[in-house]
Image (tube, rainbow, N blue to C red):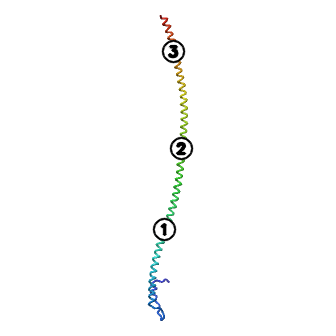
Amino acid sequence: MEWTPRDTERKRFPVTWRGYSQREVDLFVDQTASEMDRLKADNAALQREVQQLSKELSEHREREKAIRSILTNVQKASELMKANAEKEAKMIIADAELRAEKILQAAHQRLSQLHQDIAELKRQRIQLEAKLRSTIETYRQLLDAQREDDHEAEAMEGKVTFLSR
C-alpha cells in the first residue's frame, strides 16, 4: 500500500493507559505528513526535471548523431572533391603535355621546312649565279664580236675611203 500524507494525518492510535502522549503523537503525525508533502512535491519536481533532462539528453543525442552524420558526409565530400581535383589536375597536366608536344612537333616541322627553304634558296642562288655568269659571258662574247665587227667595218671603211680617193 502506498502511503500519502493524508493517510498519515488520518491515522489514529488507540489511547491506552500506558500509551504515548496523544499530543506528541499528533504533532509527530502532522510533521510527518508535512514532510511527506514536501518530499512528494520534491519528488514530483525531480521527476519533471528528470523527464526534462531525459528529453534534452535525447535531443542532444539526436543532434550529436546528426552532427556526426554531417561530419562524415562532409569528410566524404571533401575526399571526393580532393579526388576530383587531383583527377582534373592530372587531366590538365596531360592536356598541357599534349599541347606542348604538338607545339614542339610543329616547331620541329617548321624548322625542317625552314632548312628545306634555305636549301632551296641556296640552290636557286647557285642557279641564278650560273645564269648570270652565262648571260654576262654571252654579252661579253657579243661585245667582243661587235668590236670585231666594228674593227672590220672600220677597216672596210678605211679601204673604201682609200679607194674612193
Image quadrant in which you'd find residue 38:
bottom left
Q: Crowding at label 1, few (<14), some or many (≥20) Cα neighbours within 10 Å?
A: few
Structural distance between the alpha carbons of marks 2 and 1: 58 Å
Extreme residue in the bottom direction: 17
Residue 83 placement (x, y as % from top left): 53, 54
Q: Which of marks 3 and 1 is nearer the N terminus?
A: 1
Q: Earlier in the sequence, mark 3 or mark 2?
A: 2
Establish if 66 lies above or below 129: below
**In the image, what residue type sits under mark 3?**
Arg
Residue 103 placement (x, y as % from top left): 53, 42
Tag nearer the camera, 3 or 2 = 3
Tag nearer the camera, 3 or 1 = 3
Q: Which of marks 2 and 1 is nearer the N terminus?
A: 1
Q: Circle 3 is placed at which residue position?
A: 147
Establish if 137 lies above or below 45: above
Mark number, residue 100: 2
Residue 102 placement (x, y as % from top left): 54, 42
Structural distance between the alpha carbons of marks 3 and 2: 68 Å
Mark number, residue 7: none
Image quadrant in which you'd find residue 42:
bottom left
Q: Circle 1 is placed at which residue position?
A: 60
**In the image, what residue type sits under mark 2?**
Ala
- 119 and 6: which is toward the camera: 119
**In the image, what residue type sits under mark 1?**
His
Q: How many labels does the image show?
A: 3
- 62 and 32: which is toward the camera: 32
Residue 64 placement (x, y as % from top left): 50, 66
Identity of the residue drawn at 53% across and 44% down: 100
